[in-house]
Image: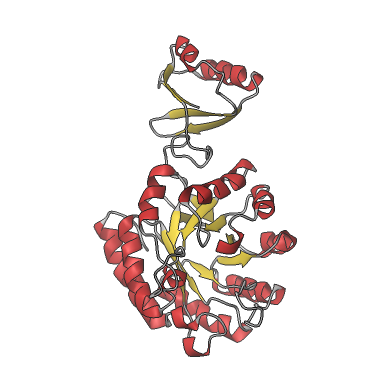
Amino acid sequence: MIIKLKNTASEEQVSKLKNKLLNQGFELHESIGESTHILGVIGDTSGFDINSLYAYEFIDTVLRVQEPFKKVNRKFKPDDTIVNVSGIEVGGKNIVIMGGPCAVESEDQIDEITPLVKAAGAKILRGGAYKPRTSPYSFQGLGLEGLDILERAKIKYNIPIVSEIMSVDELPYFIEKVDLIQVGARNMQNFNLLKELGKTNKPILLKRGLASTIEEWLMSAEYILAGGNSNVILCERGIRTYETSTRSTLDISSVAVLKKLTHLPVVVDPSHAAGRWEYVESLSRAAIAAGADGLIIEVHQTPELALSDGQQSLKPVRFKNLVDSCKKIANAIDRTLE
């Protein structure tokens, strides 16, 4: 249930209403925007007479929320959420580019690629220390050693890092070392992991599952917000369809749908969706034009020698061209991409 208050509502009036609802066993989510003041009421309101609230002269509108997701719902919070990733703001009018290799392979590799992607326009360095792979014989990542390499690059080049977590056991290391914790497509519905991430205040990049609906995706985000962590960024990375010409089918329409349904920032991963480097720039431009708040791009100095996903990785010069072309689109739609 959503209660929209009039601008004339006083602090004392709002406090009395909140106490009444809390005493009836409801949980409250308050959102105060530039021109709106909303109380989101979470709980079983099926037996509650919403018309009775109109007895309060400072209440403007009362609505029942039909969607199962509450805290991530734009009805509960009309203004865009801006997630601060160690000084980099994702959301609102800002567009943020994240770039780096699929996997951390060595100290030299990360030391070479980091200044290149930063100079090209990446505000956040991506790199996988733990790699979930379809084949048990594929490169699985360097693990904690990979996190240490990323952390040293973060300090040396003054750039935040994003990396994928695989299990709850790794969480203490990620809290200490990583600025933006990525939940991969295969873990989107790892509810035990989501609950633990909800207990932290770390920004979370939540990727869409391989065959998940938008509602299922938002319900996974709800787990994190329900735990108390509102620093969630959604990441569209393509879904599994019958089409085989690309690795996955990038659902550009999900950006528009999410912008209507939720206040959370939305970024797009065209690298994993395409599975081929030739398509990444076109899909990136489409994502920005559709309203995405950022991109996460795989970049490797020698893709032909990459231990993971070289076929979808851009070389640094192509990555710079991508960023430059996306800046033009951002300017055209009155967004900021620095």
At 27% across and 55% down in the image, what residue appears?
333
At 66% across and 65% down in the image, what residue appears?
166
- The residue at the far left in this view is 332
Q: Position of residue 257 (x, y in %)?
A: 38, 49
- The residue at the far top in this view is 55
At 60% across and 78% down in the image, what residue appears?
104
Q: Quadrant of residue 145?
A: bottom right
Quadrant showing the C terminus:
bottom left
Q: Quadrant of residue 287?
A: bottom left
- The residue at the far front in this view is 242
Query: In the rendered image, is residue 184 in sight?
Result: no
Q: Position of residue 167 (x, y in %)?
A: 70, 62
Foreground residue among 166 and 160: 166
Q: Position of residue 222 (x, y in %)?
A: 57, 44
Foreground residue among 135 and 301: 135
Q: Position of residue 196 (x, y in %)?
A: 69, 51
Left or right side of 337 for 148: right
Left or right side of 309 for 255: left
Foreground residue among 263 and 155: 263
Q: What count of labels does the image hold?
A: 0
Height in image: 275 above or below 202? Answer: below
Q: Quadrant of residue 188?
A: bottom right
Q: How is the image coloured?
A: secondary structure
Height in image: 143 above or below 227? Answer: below
Left or right side of 255 for 155: right
Query: In the rendered image, is residue 111 in sight?
Result: yes
